[in-house]
Protein backbone atom coordinates (compact mmCIF):
# COMPACT_ATOMS: atom_id res chain seq x y z
CA UNK A 1 0.00 0.00 0.00
CA UNK A 2 2.52 2.64 1.15
CA UNK A 3 6.22 2.40 0.41
CA UNK A 4 8.80 4.97 1.47
CA UNK A 5 12.37 4.48 0.30
CA UNK A 6 15.49 6.48 1.22
CA UNK A 7 13.45 9.62 1.78
CA UNK A 8 15.19 12.83 2.78
CA UNK A 9 13.34 16.04 3.61
CA UNK A 10 13.87 19.34 5.37
CA UNK A 11 12.36 22.81 5.32
CA UNK A 12 15.96 24.03 5.15
CA UNK A 13 18.25 22.08 2.81
CA UNK A 14 21.08 22.50 5.31
CA UNK A 15 19.05 20.95 8.12
CA UNK A 16 17.19 17.80 7.16
CA UNK A 17 14.28 16.51 9.23
CA UNK A 18 14.49 13.05 7.64
CA UNK A 19 17.45 11.44 5.92
CA UNK A 20 17.31 8.07 4.13
CA UNK A 21 14.03 7.17 5.81
CA UNK A 22 12.38 3.91 4.71
CA UNK A 23 8.99 2.60 5.81
CA UNK A 24 6.33 0.13 4.64
CA UNK A 25 2.66 0.20 5.63
CA UNK A 26 0.31 -2.66 4.78
CA UNK A 27 -3.50 -2.79 4.54
CA UNK A 28 -5.70 -4.00 7.37
CA UNK A 29 -3.85 -2.28 10.22
CA UNK A 30 -4.16 0.69 12.55
CA UNK A 31 -0.75 2.31 12.95
CA UNK A 32 0.06 4.47 15.94
CA UNK A 33 2.64 7.13 15.09
CA UNK A 34 4.09 8.28 18.39
CA UNK A 35 6.63 10.94 19.22
CA UNK A 36 7.25 14.05 21.25
CA UNK A 37 6.24 17.45 19.88
CA UNK A 38 8.74 18.37 17.19
CA UNK A 39 9.73 14.77 16.44
CA UNK A 40 8.62 15.10 12.81
CA UNK A 41 5.25 13.31 12.98
CA UNK A 42 3.24 15.97 11.13
CA UNK A 43 5.93 16.42 8.48
CA UNK A 44 5.97 12.68 7.82
CA UNK A 45 2.17 12.60 7.50
CA UNK A 46 2.22 15.51 5.07
CA UNK A 47 4.86 13.75 2.98
CA UNK A 48 2.66 10.66 2.90
CA UNK A 49 -0.34 12.78 1.92
CA UNK A 50 1.58 14.51 -0.88
CA UNK A 51 1.38 17.93 0.79
CA UNK A 52 5.16 18.07 1.14
CA UNK A 53 7.73 16.89 -1.39
CA UNK A 54 10.86 14.90 -0.49
CA UNK A 55 14.20 16.28 -1.58
CA UNK A 56 15.43 12.75 -2.24
CA UNK A 57 13.91 9.30 -2.25
CA UNK A 58 10.36 8.17 -2.95
CA UNK A 59 6.99 8.01 -1.21
CA UNK A 60 4.55 5.82 -3.13
CA UNK A 61 0.92 4.94 -2.47
CA UNK A 62 -0.23 1.94 -4.51
CA UNK A 63 2.83 2.41 -6.72
CA UNK A 64 2.16 6.11 -7.45
CA UNK A 65 4.30 8.95 -6.13
CA UNK A 66 2.23 10.89 -3.59
CA UNK A 67 3.82 14.16 -4.72
CA UNK A 68 1.91 13.87 -8.02
CA UNK A 69 -1.45 14.22 -6.20
CA UNK A 70 -2.86 11.87 -8.84
CA UNK A 71 -6.64 11.36 -8.72
CA UNK A 72 -6.06 7.66 -8.00
CA UNK A 73 -4.36 8.78 -4.78
CA UNK A 74 -6.70 11.60 -3.80
CA UNK A 75 -9.86 9.50 -4.02
CA UNK A 76 -8.31 6.76 -1.87
CA UNK A 77 -6.58 8.88 0.80
CA UNK A 78 -8.07 11.19 3.42
CA UNK A 79 -5.88 13.41 5.60
CA UNK A 80 -7.20 15.20 8.69
CA UNK A 81 -4.52 17.64 9.92
CA UNK A 82 -4.24 18.84 13.50
CA UNK A 83 -5.07 22.41 12.45
CA UNK A 84 -7.90 22.89 9.99
CA UNK A 85 -10.36 25.43 8.61
CA UNK A 86 -14.08 24.81 8.21
CA UNK A 87 -16.31 26.96 5.98
CA UNK A 88 -19.40 28.77 7.33
CA UNK A 89 -21.84 26.19 5.97
CA UNK A 90 -23.95 23.43 7.50
CA UNK A 91 -22.69 19.90 8.02
CA UNK A 92 -25.11 18.71 5.35
CA UNK A 93 -23.77 21.25 2.84
CA UNK A 94 -20.18 20.29 3.70
CA UNK A 95 -20.96 16.64 2.92
CA UNK A 96 -22.77 17.54 -0.31
CA UNK A 97 -19.77 19.55 -1.55
CA UNK A 98 -16.97 17.18 -0.49
CA UNK A 99 -18.36 13.63 -0.60
CA UNK A 100 -18.38 13.38 -4.45
CA UNK A 101 -14.57 13.39 -4.39
CA UNK A 102 -14.66 10.00 -2.65
CA UNK A 103 -16.37 7.26 -4.71
CA UNK A 104 -16.71 4.98 -1.66
CA UNK A 105 -18.32 7.60 0.59
CA UNK A 106 -21.22 6.10 2.59
CA UNK A 107 -23.92 8.62 3.58
CA UNK A 108 -25.72 6.22 5.92
CA UNK A 109 -22.46 5.54 7.69
CA UNK A 110 -21.84 9.27 8.11
CA UNK A 111 -25.35 9.80 9.50
CA UNK A 112 -24.70 7.08 12.07
CA UNK A 113 -21.48 8.79 13.13
CA UNK A 114 -23.28 12.10 13.59
CA UNK A 115 -25.90 10.35 15.72
CA UNK A 116 -23.11 8.80 17.79
CA UNK A 117 -21.54 12.23 18.31
CA UNK A 118 -24.96 13.83 18.96
CA UNK A 119 -24.65 16.30 16.10
CA UNK A 120 -27.30 17.39 13.62
CA UNK A 121 -26.51 17.76 9.92
CA UNK A 122 -28.30 21.12 10.01
CA UNK A 123 -25.70 22.47 12.48
CA UNK A 124 -23.51 25.25 11.10
CA UNK A 125 -19.83 24.36 11.23
CA UNK A 126 -18.94 27.93 12.19
CA UNK A 127 -21.12 27.66 15.30
CA UNK A 128 -19.54 24.44 16.56
CA UNK A 129 -16.75 24.16 19.10
CA UNK A 130 -13.29 22.95 18.04
CA UNK A 131 -14.03 19.50 19.45
CA UNK A 132 -17.39 19.28 17.66
CA UNK A 133 -15.82 20.32 14.35
CA UNK A 134 -13.22 17.62 14.82
CA UNK A 135 -15.98 15.04 15.37
CA UNK A 136 -17.58 16.06 12.06
CA UNK A 137 -14.28 15.71 10.19
CA UNK A 138 -13.44 12.40 11.86
CA UNK A 139 -16.88 11.07 10.96
CA UNK A 140 -16.50 12.33 7.40
CA UNK A 141 -13.07 10.70 7.11
CA UNK A 142 -14.35 7.33 8.32
CA UNK A 143 -17.35 7.53 5.97
CA UNK A 144 -15.08 8.05 2.94
CA UNK A 145 -13.94 4.41 3.31
CA UNK A 146 -10.66 5.31 1.64
CA UNK A 147 -7.78 2.86 1.60
CA UNK A 148 -5.56 5.13 3.71
CA UNK A 149 -6.94 7.36 6.46
CA UNK A 150 -4.42 9.74 8.09
CA UNK A 151 -5.38 11.42 11.38
CA UNK A 152 -2.98 13.92 12.94
CA UNK A 153 -3.63 14.39 16.68
CA UNK A 154 -7.33 13.45 16.27
CA UNK A 155 -8.05 13.31 20.02
CA UNK A 156 -6.90 16.89 20.70
CA UNK A 157 -9.98 18.87 21.69
CA UNK A 158 -12.05 15.78 22.50
CA UNK A 159 -13.36 15.20 26.02
CA UNK A 160 -13.03 11.81 27.72
CA UNK A 161 -16.40 10.40 26.53
CA UNK A 162 -15.65 11.57 22.97
CA UNK A 163 -12.25 9.87 23.03
CA UNK A 164 -13.98 6.64 23.99
CA UNK A 165 -16.44 7.11 21.10
CA UNK A 166 -13.52 7.77 18.75
CA UNK A 167 -11.77 4.53 19.73
CA UNK A 168 -15.00 2.57 19.29
CA UNK A 169 -15.65 4.00 15.82
CA UNK A 170 -12.10 3.38 14.63
CA UNK A 171 -12.14 -0.19 15.93
CA UNK A 172 -15.45 -0.96 14.23
CA UNK A 173 -14.82 0.82 10.94
CA UNK A 174 -11.64 -0.80 9.59
CA UNK A 175 -11.87 -3.23 6.66
CA UNK A 176 -9.22 -5.64 5.39
CA UNK A 177 -8.13 -3.37 2.52
CA UNK A 178 -7.83 -0.21 4.63
CA UNK A 179 -5.15 1.20 6.90
CA UNK A 180 -5.30 4.04 9.38
CA UNK A 181 -2.37 6.11 10.64
CA UNK A 182 -3.04 7.94 13.90
CA UNK A 183 -0.42 10.40 15.08
CA UNK A 184 -0.42 11.56 18.69
CA UNK A 185 1.79 12.55 21.58
CA UNK A 186 -0.99 11.46 23.96
CA UNK A 187 0.02 7.81 24.06
CA UNK A 188 -2.81 6.65 26.32
CA UNK A 189 -5.41 7.72 23.75
CA UNK A 190 -4.33 4.82 21.48
CA UNK A 191 -4.50 2.14 24.16
CA UNK A 192 -6.42 -0.89 22.87
CA UNK A 193 -6.86 0.67 19.43
CA UNK A 194 -3.69 0.17 17.38
CA UNK A 195 -2.05 -3.06 16.26
CA UNK A 196 1.20 -1.56 14.96
CA UNK A 197 3.39 1.12 16.46
CA UNK A 198 5.89 3.55 14.91
CA UNK A 199 7.95 5.66 17.31
CA UNK A 200 9.78 8.75 16.04
CA UNK A 201 12.54 10.43 18.01
CA UNK A 202 15.21 12.83 16.76
CA UNK A 203 13.54 12.52 13.35
CA UNK A 204 14.37 8.81 13.01
CA UNK A 205 12.27 5.69 13.48
CA UNK A 206 13.21 4.14 16.81
CA UNK A 207 10.68 1.33 16.62
CA UNK A 208 8.32 -0.04 13.98
CA UNK A 209 6.70 -3.29 15.06
CA UNK A 210 3.35 -4.92 15.59
CA UNK A 211 2.08 -5.25 19.14
CA UNK A 212 2.32 -9.01 18.68
CA UNK A 213 6.04 -8.74 17.90
CA UNK A 214 6.55 -6.42 20.87
CA UNK A 215 4.79 -8.91 23.17
CA UNK A 216 7.06 -11.67 21.90
CA UNK A 217 10.18 -9.78 22.89
CA UNK A 218 9.12 -7.68 25.87
CA UNK A 219 7.10 -8.07 29.05
CA UNK A 220 5.61 -5.22 31.07
CA UNK A 221 5.59 -5.87 34.80
CA UNK A 222 5.00 -4.39 38.20
CA UNK A 223 8.06 -5.53 40.13
CA UNK A 224 7.23 -6.79 43.61
CA UNK A 225 10.88 -7.12 44.65
CA UNK A 226 14.15 -5.52 43.61
CA UNK A 227 15.73 -8.80 42.55
CA UNK A 228 14.84 -8.42 38.86
CA UNK A 229 15.67 -4.73 38.48
CA UNK A 230 19.05 -5.45 36.92
CA UNK A 231 17.35 -7.37 34.09
CA UNK A 232 15.01 -4.50 33.28
CA UNK A 233 15.52 -2.49 30.08
CA UNK A 234 13.61 0.44 31.57
CA UNK A 235 11.94 1.14 34.91
CA UNK A 236 9.57 3.85 36.05
CA UNK A 237 8.26 4.59 39.53
CA UNK A 238 4.46 4.88 39.64
CA UNK A 239 1.80 5.07 42.32
CA UNK A 240 1.35 1.31 41.91
CA UNK A 241 5.06 0.66 42.40
CA UNK A 242 8.03 0.08 40.12
CA UNK A 243 6.91 -0.66 36.54
CA UNK A 244 9.45 -2.30 34.27
CA UNK A 245 10.02 -3.19 30.64
CA UNK A 246 11.79 -6.57 30.64
CA UNK A 247 13.18 -8.94 28.01
CA UNK A 248 10.56 -11.66 27.65
CA UNK A 249 12.74 -14.61 28.64
CA UNK A 250 9.79 -16.37 30.27
CA UNK A 251 7.83 -16.64 26.99
CA UNK A 252 4.83 -15.09 28.72
CA UNK A 253 2.18 -12.72 27.41
CA UNK A 254 1.70 -9.32 29.02
CA UNK A 255 -0.36 -6.40 27.76
CA UNK A 256 1.77 -3.79 26.02
CA UNK A 257 1.93 -0.59 28.07
CA UNK A 258 2.24 2.03 25.31
CA UNK A 259 3.44 4.83 27.57
CA UNK A 260 6.05 2.63 29.20
CA UNK A 261 7.16 1.33 25.79
CA UNK A 262 7.43 4.85 24.40
CA UNK A 263 9.62 6.00 27.31
CA UNK A 264 11.78 2.89 26.99
CA UNK A 265 12.25 3.53 23.27
CA UNK A 266 13.25 7.14 23.90
CA UNK A 267 15.52 6.66 26.90
CA UNK A 268 16.90 3.16 26.23
CA UNK A 269 17.02 3.22 22.44
CA UNK A 270 20.24 1.20 22.10
CA UNK A 271 18.94 -1.64 24.31
CA UNK A 272 15.69 -1.88 22.37
CA UNK A 273 17.45 -1.63 19.01
CA UNK A 274 19.69 -4.56 19.95
CA UNK A 275 16.74 -6.62 21.15
CA UNK A 276 14.57 -6.01 18.09
CA UNK A 277 17.35 -6.44 15.54
CA UNK A 278 17.89 -10.06 16.63
CA UNK A 279 15.72 -13.00 15.61
CA UNK A 280 13.21 -14.18 18.24
CA UNK A 281 13.82 -17.71 19.55
CA UNK A 282 10.10 -18.40 20.02
CA UNK A 283 6.63 -17.14 19.14
CA UNK A 284 3.84 -16.41 21.60
CA UNK A 285 0.34 -17.76 21.17
CA UNK A 286 -1.94 -15.61 23.32
Image: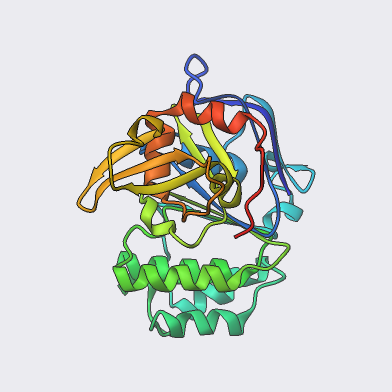
Residue under the image location 53 percent in, 68 percent down:
170
Q: Position of residue 27 (x, y in %)?
A: 70, 56
Residue 88 can be seen in this image = no
Relative placement, left or right, of 206 versus 245 is right
So how many labels did they put on this image? 0
Residue under the image location 44 percent in, 34 percent down:
265
Q: Position of residue 199 (x, y in %)?
A: 49, 39
Residue under the image location 56 percent in, 41 percent down:
217
Q: Residue furthest left?
A: 239
Residue 3 occupies quadrant: top right
Residue 2 can be seen in this image = yes
Relative placement, left or right, of 269 versus 140 is left
Instruction: Depth check: give the residue in front, 45 or 124.
Output: 45
Q: Residue furthest right?
A: 63
Pick the quarter of the image with the C terminus: bottom right
Instruction: Depth check: give the residue in front, 34 or 281.
Output: 281
Q: Position of residue 75 (x, y in %)?
A: 70, 60
Q: Residue furthest top?
A: 14
Q: Position of residue 105 (x, y in %)?
A: 65, 73
Q: Can you say whether 142 is above or below 245 in the image?
A: below
Relative placement, left or right, of 155 versus 148 is left
Residue under the image location 46 percent in, 56 percent down:
255
Q: How is the image coloured?
A: rainbow
Q: Can you say whether 89 is above or below 193 in the image?
A: below
Instruction: Depth check: give the residue in front, 53 or 198.
Output: 198
Instruction: Depth check: give the residue in front, 76 or 257.
Output: 257
Amino acid sequence: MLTIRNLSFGYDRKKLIFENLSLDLKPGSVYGLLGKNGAGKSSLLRLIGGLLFPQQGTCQFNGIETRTRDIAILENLYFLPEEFHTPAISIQEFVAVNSPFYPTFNHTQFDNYMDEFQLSKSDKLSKLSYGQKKKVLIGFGLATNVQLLILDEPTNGLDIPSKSQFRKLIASGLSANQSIIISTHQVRDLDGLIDNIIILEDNTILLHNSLEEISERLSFKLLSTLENVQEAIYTEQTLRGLMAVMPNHGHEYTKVDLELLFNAAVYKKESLHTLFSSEPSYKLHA
